[in-house]
Image (tube, rainbow, N blue to C red):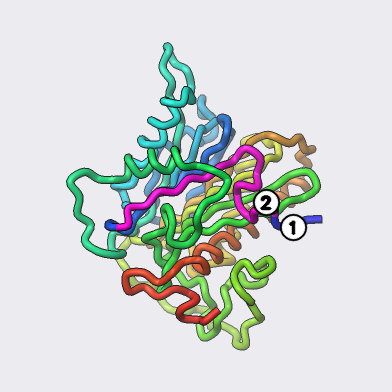
Amino acid sequence: MIAPGPLNSICDVEGITVGNAEDHGLTTGVTVVLPDRACPAVVDHRGGGIGSRACTVLAPGSEMPEVHAITLSGGSAFGLDAPGGVMHGLSTAGRGYEIGGQRVPIVPGSIIFDLLTGGPKEWEHPPWWELGHKAHKGAGKSFALGNAGAGIGATAGPLKGGLGTASFRADTYTVGSVAVANPVGSVVIPGTNSFRAWHLAQGDEVGIQTPPATQADLWDGTPEGPAMANTTLTVVATDAKLSRDHLHRIAIMAQDGMAQAVRPVHSPLDGDTVYVLSTMARYIDPTPATVARLGTLAADTVARSIMRGVYEAESLAGVPSYREVHGR
């Protein structure tokens, strides 16, 4: 039987915790995915406006194929400071690769553009290093959704975006994801109240979804906005023991969850990115069929996480929420 885990969260995966931190004055924040041990991980970039840090360690052939955390941040390129704060917290706790008596944590990170949401973005010192450090210190099994962490300044087309999560638990493994929904594209079928991926929703995690009464146009119009001004970021985690080649295949498949939830997707205006990591806690026989099943569940949790991020968000800074507009 396959069903959402008890938390319906990426934290249903054994060994995973998540931390959030926000600067409400600047309407920006950081989310950190923190495994309890170094994990093999991969990344798959599909958007045309990518902002990332330390992702070369995830490339095939890297001598450091494991990571200690993954950071998702607002702040555009300024937010690339956030992994530094997480690294400091990890090294203080004695975590990281030991090199000549020094601990060096490996923390890849990616950013969204949220600099136009909320009030003036003015600071004496950019806050994202401190936000990363705070998010690391606060990591646990429970975390806020919607206007929280890296999702506080997110927008999703004409709606308020946000932070979402979802999971599936099978007999021998768990798959979960967390997403910062900040796409230039639409997550709702035009002319309806239905999320594009409404059919994947489990229970009432995004309210009561019904089949749309009308068929959406094949093309919904050209999105407006400056280049690199949007991005959806996702981290997928599993406890299934897998090679990095298997994780890379799952990352490719997980991108299809983003494509089910957002249209247009992977555009020149987005920096769409999927990370996949394994805590290696449960042995499985990684047959092609099993890897395909894992990839399918990963894609479904990505789509559900994006929907939940938008559904849980509240109206902010003149950007209306899904529930304000659609009353669900």
For the residue marked with disc 1, what is the amino acid? Ala
Dot in front, 1 or 2 = 1
In the rendering, at what x and y percent does residue 304 appear?
Answer: 60, 62
In the rendering, at what x and y percent does residue 111 appear?
Answer: 39, 50
Which residue corresponds to mark 1?
3
Residue lying at the far top of the rendered structure: 100
Is 112 in front, or is 308?
308
Q: Quadrant of residue 278?
A: top right
Which residue corresponds to mark 2?
295
| Residue extent of the magenta highlight | 5-24
Residue in the picture at 58% in, 48% down = 236
Residue in the picture at 52% in, 45% down = 18
- On the rendered structure, is 21 left or right of 143? left
Residue in the picture at 58% in, 45% down = 141
For the residue marked with disc 2, what is the amino acid? Gly
Look at the numbered disc 1 and give the secondary structure of its residue: loop
In this orientation, does residue 156 appear?
no
Measure the C-alpha gap from mark 1 to mark 2. 15 Å
Q: Quadrant of residue 296?
A: bottom right
Q: Quadrant of residue 243?
A: top right
The correct choice, above or below, for 157 with respect to 136 in the image is: below
Q: Earlier in the sequence, mark 1 or mark 2?
A: 1
- On the rendered structure, is 74 left or right of 166? left
Quarter of the picture containing the N terminus is bottom right
Say if the magenta span includes residue 168: no
Residue in the picture at 63% in, 36% down = 279
Look at the numbered disc 2 and give the secondary structure of its residue: helix
Is 252 in front, or is 113?
113
